[in-house]
Image (cartoon, rainbow, N blue to C red):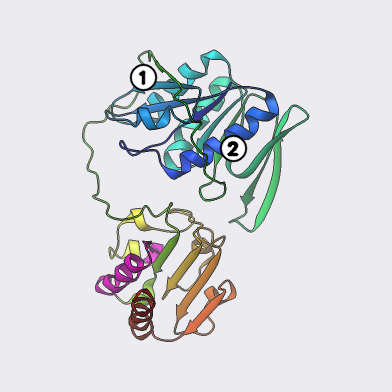
Amino acid sequence: MILVVLDHDGNKLRKASLEALTRARKLSEAFGEGVAGVLLAEGQAPVEEARAYVETLYVAELGPYTAEKWAAGILEAAKAGVKAIVAPSSRQSRTYMGRVAYALKAGLLEDTLESWAEGGEVYATRYAYLNRVTQKVKTAPPVVLTVKPNTTPLAEPLGQAGQVVALPIPPVPTVEVLERVQEEKKGVSLTEANVVVTGGRGMGGPEAFKEAEELAALLGGAVGATRAVVDAGWRPYSEQVGQTGKTVQPSLYIALGVSGAVQHLAGMNKSKYIVAVNKDPEAPIFKHADYGIVGDVHQVLPALIQAVKKLKD
């Protein structure tokens, strides 16, 4: 069996789950194994949507997320026997997939760009050294593999609904979640956005991000921020792009007042097109940009907004 961990927001599957499904189906063809999904939930879960993509769907209601409980749920589904477990790469999967791999004595391939089976082994490519090097790696089954977002075509439904199996989850020693404060997020998810508008310290202050938000909304994208901006309290950590934040790979990345430190580049340098605006012509970001504008972001940004509005009209 090839098992896919189906990430969701409570109402629908995340795009990254459909990418993981595509990878799982490719391994399924190579090994001659069926594809099953596991849906772990804290209350509501998109069961009907998920069962349209897999032959068998394992479902467990686990309460508030902890890595121990999520790992236990996946391992329960894996008792049927697995060649591979595939999951979207995320901050959460980095905490629970290692536990799953250890329990199964499986090879762990994280943040993979592509994956395939050959000669009974699983191969994958992934970035290393701050995304400057691409590695080719391999391991023998069973394998635990995570899929880097925005690297793989989205899977299509099968055309028929798979069977649903409720998972019995044994009690596991775990951290107890006493309280959770969740930030209200509007618009497109940063990691799933096709357009990302990121502001750096050159924005000057939090008020300047209103125009960044306007540009992102016009382009149907999301707003990002550098670590310096987040550390200054101008924007929330959930918007941080970079080595210690989120990795994005949109079709269009607009960097406003971003210097281009190597730690930030690690989170966005694989974007299809990069547009940089900076008043310093020697800013490192220009070495990585497809298009560069040397100028004051407070003058260029309003002009960009007006240009987009004109095109939309």
Front-most of 41 and 105? 41
Q: Look at discs 1 and 2 and give the one toward the viewer.
A: 2
* Residue 228 placement: quadrant: bottom left
Magenta segment, prevailing SS (helix, strand or loop):
helix
Label 2 belongs to which residue? 23
| Left or right: residue 199 compared with residue 145 | left
Q: Secondary structure at mark 2?
A: helix
Query: How would you rate the neighbour count of disc 2 (Cα within 10 Å): few for under 14, some for 14-19, many for 20 or more?
Result: many
- Residue depicted at x 50% and y 70%: 260
Q: CA distance from mark 1 to mark 2?
A: 32 Å
- Determine if the magenta segment contains residue 152: no
The magenta segment is 205-228
Number of numbered discs overlaid on the protein picture: 2
Residue 109: x %, y % from top left: 61, 37
133 left or right of 239? right
Give how far across and how far down residue 224 sits, in percent. 38, 62
Residue occupying the far right of the picture: 119
Q: Residue 173 shows which numbered tag?
A: 1
